[in-house]
Amino acid sequence: MAEEVRPEKCVVAVDGPSGSGKSTVSRRLATRIDGVYLDTGAMYRAVTWAVLQAGVDLSDPDAIAKIALETELSIGTDPTAPHLAANGVNVDAPIRGTEVTQAVSTVAAVPAVRKQLVALQQAIIGAHPRIIVEGRDIASVVAPDADLKVYLTASSAARAQRRSAENAVDASATEADLARRDKLDSSRAVDPLRQANDAIEVDTTGIGIDEVVAYLLNLLNSKVTS
């Protein structure tokens, strides 16, 4: 078993596309170091949910930005029971639905939305001594000075299989949707999905979660003790 690491202060950035294992790995790693966990993707999903609830035209970035500014997010960072509320409504379930999934890349591409949520994410990071943060632009934008930067990836088939198992939907349709989101997230003008130059890539295809977490613990240990 990897040596337990509990530095006084530690920020770990975990980036990567959907289905790469970010959430499960990040939550387990946060538990192992007695830290907290922040899912930045869920924050964009919550704003997307609020935008859809308001009936805003997704082709109107100004209207999307207005809803984002008006939406109050309540974010729970306990890795064993993370939760998220928007304007007092628990949205843990609805933000994982098809409607939000189809629209989130569009909402997340609006510069004003990204500016607002990045500022909130950085405030949350600053409020906690040990935190694991997952998303698509953590190492490059949100926490460029993170103690450890990791980019998780996996084959498109493996990612689709994981997502389809979670959502009980067809794997081929899921793979096509993941490809669609990858293209949108990687090509947006502001804070695109990309691997930071100093991030360590970890291919999780065919690797168990415990093995990935143990590997990251070893990496973190070498970073904070060097």
Image: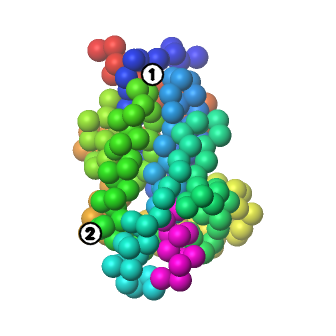
- Residue 157, by quadrant, is bottom right
Residue that appears at 29% across and 14% down:
226
Task: Report the magenta residues as a range.
Answer: 46-56
Is residue 19 shown left or right of residue 226? right
Amino acid at dot 1: Asn
Q: CA distance from mark 2 to mark 1?
A: 35 Å
Q: Does the image show residue 30?
A: yes
Magenta stretch holds residue 98: no
Magenta segment, prevailing SS (helix, strand or loop): helix
- Residue 97, by quadrant, is bottom right
Relative to 210, say whether 185 is above or below.
below
Kind of element beneath mark 1: helix
Residue under numbered circle 2: 189
Tag on residue 218? 1
Amino acid at dot 2: Ala
Task: For marks 2 and 1, give the one nearer the viewer.
Answer: 2
Kind of element beneath mark 2: loop
Residue sitting nearer the eye, 216 or 117: 117
Relative to 213, say whether 191 is above or below.
below
Relative to 174, say whether 78 is above or below.
above
Q: Does the image show residue 208?
A: no
Residue 32, given in percent of the width and then of the height, sits at 56, 24
